[in-house]
Image (cartoon, grey):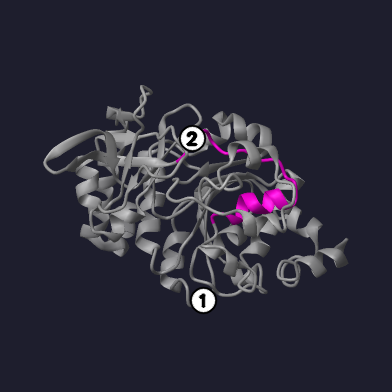
Amino acid sequence: MKVLSKVIYPWAFSNRFTGMKDLIESFSKPRGIVLTFGNGGFEQGLLNIMHIRKNLNCYLPVQVFYNGLQDLDQEKAEALNRIDGVSTKNLQEVFGGIAEDRNFHSKPYAILASSFKEVIYIDDDVVLFQNPERLLEDSRIFQKYGSLFFKGRSYDFGNSKWVRWFIKSPSFEANKTGRYFRDLSKDEMDASLMLFDKSKISIVHGLLSACHLNLREVREVFLGDKETYWLAFELLRVPYKFAPGIAGAAGSLQEKDGKIISNSVCGPQSHLDEFGKLLHVNSRSARYNHELDKWEKTLSHYIAPQSEIPGNIDSTQQPWCVSGGEGGSKEVFEVGQKEKEVLLKLRDLSMELRHENWKHYLENHL
């Protein structure tokens, strides 16, 4: 088995681990949070860690992974290590056979390399409205399958012909409830927040396969890492399930030609939990367009689209707007007071970090 593992995954079993047994035994801690960022994402990643700790009262251990000595300055790594319950790790020390990529392709390797059995992976730019540990406790999907995925938006129709040549018999999840294999969307998954239970051997194999799909010599057919997780599970017939619904938007009601459109919300991509509550927002679009302060001040509504068919996104505005259907089902909701208070605390924390700069902030608050 050791020889076979090295043949299939030489990048995984050529450095720290000699085989699957070593790898599985490294999952020595019960649960925790994993992030990946380098110098470019350091301040946002630090803000996210402090938000999770101070505003959401989540004290799970956090492991931050970077890829190569040039990715994260030693001073910044040491600063993170001084935060109680936070540690950093160079992926090259774990999996020496992978490329030193400074992007999202490092994510599956970090999830696999972490010492946690139960992993909550969070992108550095995600805005959480709930304590993420509650997902491990409350998610029925996670309890049953050992993983939890979230769907992205339906922006454009897709063509699954290319993937059917190596996945001949898609699962029920992919064929009946997924959009990708029904050509309803060229995107299926959003990978900004994911859960994995690595105490299940099937999940470990699924992650190894996802890592393989993110190797530099393999990943050219993928746009980013986000589709590689569920496709890896499909390849190995590992059962999985997405949270109900597709991604929407959280922001303010769309204004067009001087009129407010009551069934359309403009804002970054938003996700609900399994119980219909606002869980997290991917704020990258707001940040890249220098609209974060405005978004945080004006957040009032979010939309949970009912239709999976593309055509409900207006990309002529920044951030994009997502519209509901013409039917009678309620799709647009007001953001609750609790969520607004969480965002206000995050905004205050962000201003504090910017005002003091990260060095002084950590000196004054640790």
Q: Residue at x 62, y 45 (%)?
A: 196
Q: Is residue 305 left or right of residue 17?
A: left
Q: Residue at x 79, y 66 (%)?
A: 8
Considering the image in quadrants, where does the N terminus appear? Answer: bottom right
**Label 1 crowd (10 A; few <14 / some 14-19 / many >=20):** few
Q: Which disc number belongs to residue 245?
A: 2
The reply to whether residue 226 is visible in this rendering is: yes
- The residue sitting at the left extreme is 258
Residue 233 among magenta residues:
yes
Residue type at tag 1:
Leu
Q: Position of residue 31 (x, y in %)?
A: 60, 44
Range covered by the magenta-colored residues:
226-246
- When the figure is inspected, residue 82 is found, relative to residue 324, above or below; the finding is below
The reply to whether residue 364 is visible in this rendering is: no
- The residue sitting at the top extreme is 328
Magenta span dominant secondary structure = loop
Q: Which disc number belongs to residue 69?
A: 1
- Check if mark 2's residue and mark 1's residue have beta carbons within 8 Å: no
Which one is in front, 225 or 89?
225
The residue tagged with tag 1: helix, strand or loop?
Answer: loop
First reached walking from the N terminus: tag 2 or tag 1: 1
Residue 178 among magenta residues:
no
Q: Is residue 147 left or right of residue 284?
A: right
Residue type at tag 2:
Gly
- The residue sitting at the bottom extreme is 70
Query: How far separated are the C-alphas under marks 2 and 1?
Result: 40 Å
The residue tagged with tag 2: helix, strand or loop?
Answer: loop
Q: Residue at x 66, y 73 (%)?
A: 96
